[in-house]
């Protein structure tokens, strides 16, 4: 009930302390119909409990203090502030615990998925390695295959640039600035198949070299 009351006060733009303080002041002014005040539809049981609490504090105040009204209200407000603050802190702590639990669960899920991906990659790599070994074995055992291996054709400067992933201006610049062996090595570093290329002045084309 107290949590519902706090939430209701917050929705009205006020606090439980301020609301109950207002009710206490109205009660001290002999206004008993608190349910219709300020448009709040409060439960009759809450009204009775507020009155009983106020009467109890007033009685204790009359026994101990010469001016009980203001001091009693201050005491009630202090206790309400502490209770409301404790309720808010508990709510925040509960939210933080839930957030940590959700984060931990998500981390575990991500870790599990990464493990699955790693295992799948290893299986794919092993499969490719096995295929490569079988292909090399078949290639070595079949001498006729060597004779039918397609030979790379010479390329123009533009086509070589496309193959190496650079512009034809870059190809021309590197060929002019680098000695032939270094140009071949530069091409090997760019070529997707690791081939080297050298320029033939007679044909004006770039020929592949191993």
Image (spheres, grey):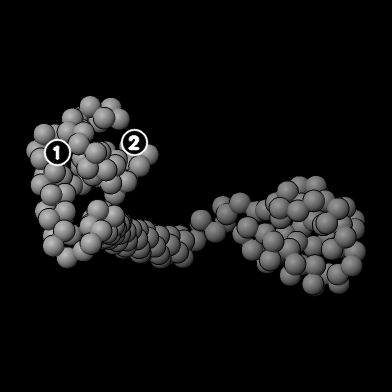
Which quadrant, please, contains the C terminus?
Answer: bottom right
In the rendered image, the quadrant that contains the N terminus is top left
Label 2 crowding class (10 Å Cα cut-off): few <14, some 14-19, many 20+? few
Indicate left or right for 21 with 170 as reference: left
Dot 1 alpha-carbon crowd within 10 angstroms: few under 14, some 14 to 19, many 20 or more: some
Q: Is residue 40 above or below residue 90?
A: above
Q: Which residue is mark 2?
A: 12
Mark 2 element type: loop
User: 105 and 166: which one is in front?
Assistant: 105
Give the image quarter of residue 65: bottom left
Q: Which label was assigned to residue 47? A: 1
Q: Residue at x 71, y 53 (%)?
A: 165
Residue 125, given in percent of the width and then of the height, sits at: 39, 62
Closest to the observer: 153 or 184? 184
Asked if 28 appears above or below 82 in the picture, the reply is: above
| Residue placed most toward the observer, 168 or 78 | 78
Q: Where residue 148 sits: x, y (%)? A: 56, 52
């Amino acid at each position: 009930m107290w949590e519902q009351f706090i939430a209701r006060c917050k929705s009205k733009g006020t606090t439980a302390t301020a609301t109950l303080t207002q009710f206490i002041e109205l009660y001290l002014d002999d206004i008993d119909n608190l349910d219709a005040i300020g448009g709040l539809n409060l439960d009759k049981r809450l009204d009775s409990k507020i009155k009983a609490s106020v009467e109890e504090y007033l009685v204790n105040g009359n026994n101990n203090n010469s001016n009980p009204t203001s001091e009693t209200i201050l005491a009630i407000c202090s206790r309400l502030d502490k209770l409301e603050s404790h309720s808010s802190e508990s709510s925040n702590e509960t939210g933080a615990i839930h957030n940590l639990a959700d984060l931990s669960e998500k981390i575990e899920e991500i870790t599990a998925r990464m493990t699955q991906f790693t295992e799948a990659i290893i299986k794919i790599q092993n499969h490719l390695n096995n295929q490569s070994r079988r292909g090399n074995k078949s290639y070595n055992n079949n001498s006729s295959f060597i004779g039918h291996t397609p030979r790379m054709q010479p390329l123009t400067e533009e086509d070589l640039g496309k193959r190496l992933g650079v512009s034809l201006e870059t190809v021309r610049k590197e060929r002019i600035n680098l000695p032939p062996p270094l140009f071949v090595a530069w091409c090997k570093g760019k070529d997707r198949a690791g081939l080297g290329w050298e320029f033939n002045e007679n044909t004006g084309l770039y020929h592949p070299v191993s």
